[in-house]
Amino acid sequence: MWAYILRRLAYNVPVYLSILLLVMLALRVRDPVFGRLPKNATTADIAQKRVELGIDRPFHQQFGSQLKQVATATFDEISWDYPGQTVGEVMSRCIGPSLSITLPSLVLTTLFSITVALISAWFRGRALDKGLVFVAVLGMSVSFLVYIIFGQYYGAYKLNEWLGYDVFAIYYNPEVSNAGWGEFFTSVWPRYYLLPVLISVVVAMGYDTRFYRAVMVEESARDYIVTATAKGASQSRIMFIHMLKNAMIPIITRVVITIPFLITGSFLLESYFGIPGMGNQLIVAVESGDFPIVQSFTAVFAAVYIASNLLTDVLYALVDPRVRLS
Amino acid sequence: MSTTTTQSSEAKTTTRELALSVQNLTTSFRSDRGLVTAVSNVSFDLFKGEALGLVGESGCGKSVTSKSLMRLLPEHVTRYGSDSKVMLGSDNVMKYSNREMRKIRGNRIAMIFQEPMTALNPVFTIGWQLDEALRHHTKLNRADRRKRVVELLDMVEIPNPDKRYGEYPHQLSGGMRQRVVIAMALACEPEILIADEPTTALDVTIQAQILRLMNDLRERTGTAILLITHDLGVVAQTCDRVVVMYAGQVVEQASVGDLFHNPSHPYTRALLQSIPRSGKKEKGKRLATIDGIVPSLLDMPKACRFAERCDCRQPQCDVEMPELVNFSGDRSVRCHFPVHK
């Protein structure tokens, strides 16, 4: 298995280098210097700014220094938008807020939708199943933005009015960024993050439930289900042990595919709730042309993406005895 | 309709002990085009230690009958007749709750399936799957269960049972998987073993081994076997008595000797004629077939269901449904004009 993992990693080296190269080339379509100088800047100012930003060097040198940062995983280049802060510092500042939304969302969505899908598949064709499918399709058909706007209106405004007490905040307060762990879990997270998490769970539930239901329906028609029933196994045992283990491959695929997006964060939620996460930061950096941030963020995303693809294969081999990595 | 048969065969066979008695089993399915009756008023008895063959062509209701006995059909679309009874001892299994049903499944009644390739769960070891039956129905501890599983694997002649315990179904051949399925069915020494086309998916040499294995077990443990098959050769080799089904009904019931040497129902005769034979006399002859097709479940004739395809058809056959009539001993026939020899 280790040989397989190493070989797969080796295959991905050229892919990864191409990603780094393409991102750097694409960024350089626009000269970043002009956005960072006043209108009446002289040629000397421009040349000096180039030196300051380090883009006076030939391209292969710039690529080389980026490669060195990636290879050593020390993102110590200084951000152009935040003078005095390294890219690594910006990243570690943004990752927490992003994960505070994406991680609970993924866990809750997966657990809920698998449970609902199991129930739906078990009552396949009956009123309960039809009702659940209807709700799932309805949920999928409504735009993300509608959930955010209604969520903010009812969750962060109407609810507070009814209760006479502020449960959810409508917008992030930068002062709470320095809260300690205890304070974070007891007051910051429920107040600033729980609402976006709930919205994101509701949005994802429709898609996930339908997907998992299809998987479960397929499994529930298999012969081994009848064999297990004839053995005297109970319905819940058949669903949660026999069926679920067989359904693990599609479940793992779906969950692991979303791992890279845990890191990238949800741009929509972060910007509507003002949460200083990775998604929000990346968009700001792309707009202002902050090369160090864009280059290093994408380098990290790409690495996580490749790693999670590999993780999928390894997990397949762990849950399905028929899969062998070689 | 055929309760007379049941009673008379019971009276006739006082020395034999009843294992399972099926009375007026009617199984229907809810479908988009209304209630479809796949099995109507099927009655037969199964005695301890005997092998009873249930034969008929595809779609005649054999498998539905066998699955009905263990109530393995999807509950929300299946309806059983209100007077349908499956008597296990003095209990009617049809009246059992799901919980009571679970207690007899795999314990007192067990089943072997047609497709060994798909009947086992691909992601659990065969040891684990065999163990499951014991875990549900016995109080043995883990170590004793393991010992018993290895014993079972050995009993169904799987080499290296200790090593095979930890293997997965895909590591076994079709014949071996079917043995595992058999071992699983026999784990709790059931009184009744229902084998639904147990050898259809296997090649001929493996078929013979599996049949021999089932016969050995019957002799050793006294388990009653209900063998569902469309293969009359298998029936002749293994069964004591035969029930012939056509279009969801029992059309003839007899001992194997009587049925093969002296078939009464025109359908049974036609079935026997359509078995390929070898020998000089048969050379160059075309194989006999039964013309026509089985009537659709959605459009079942009110009169004799076989009339369409019968060579002895009389006007009465298109008007009146024949009753299943008991003749002599174990024989009953559903025909207005049965053949007597």
Image (cartoon, coloured by chain):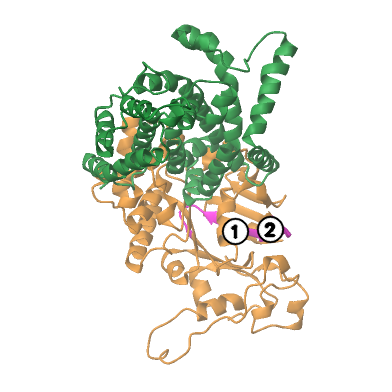
Chain colours: A green, B orange
Indicate the position of residue A294 as horizontal and vertical percent values.
40, 31
The residue beneath circle 2 is B3
The answer to whether residue B267 is left or right of residue B211 is right
Q: Earlier in the sequence, mark 1 or mark 2?
A: 2
The disc numbered 2 marks a residue on which chain? B
The residue beneath circle 1 is B44
Q: Quadrant of residue B117?
A: bottom left
Viewer-nearest residue: A160 or A318: A160
Q: Quadrant of residue A150?
A: top right
Task: Say which amino acid is labelled 1.
Answer: Phe
Residue B28 can be seen, yes or no: yes
Indicate the position of residue B104 as horizontal and vertical percent values.
52, 41
Viewer-nearest residue: B212 or A30: A30
Q: How many marks?
A: 2
Residue B166 can be seen, yes or no: no
Task: Say which amino acid is labelled 2.
Answer: Thr
Range drawn in magenta:
B31-51
Q: Quadrant of residue B280?
A: bottom left
Prevailing secondary structure of the magenta residues? strand
On screen, residue A325 above or below B319? above
The structure residue drawn at horizontal position 63% and vertical position 15%, both measured from the top left corner, is: A168
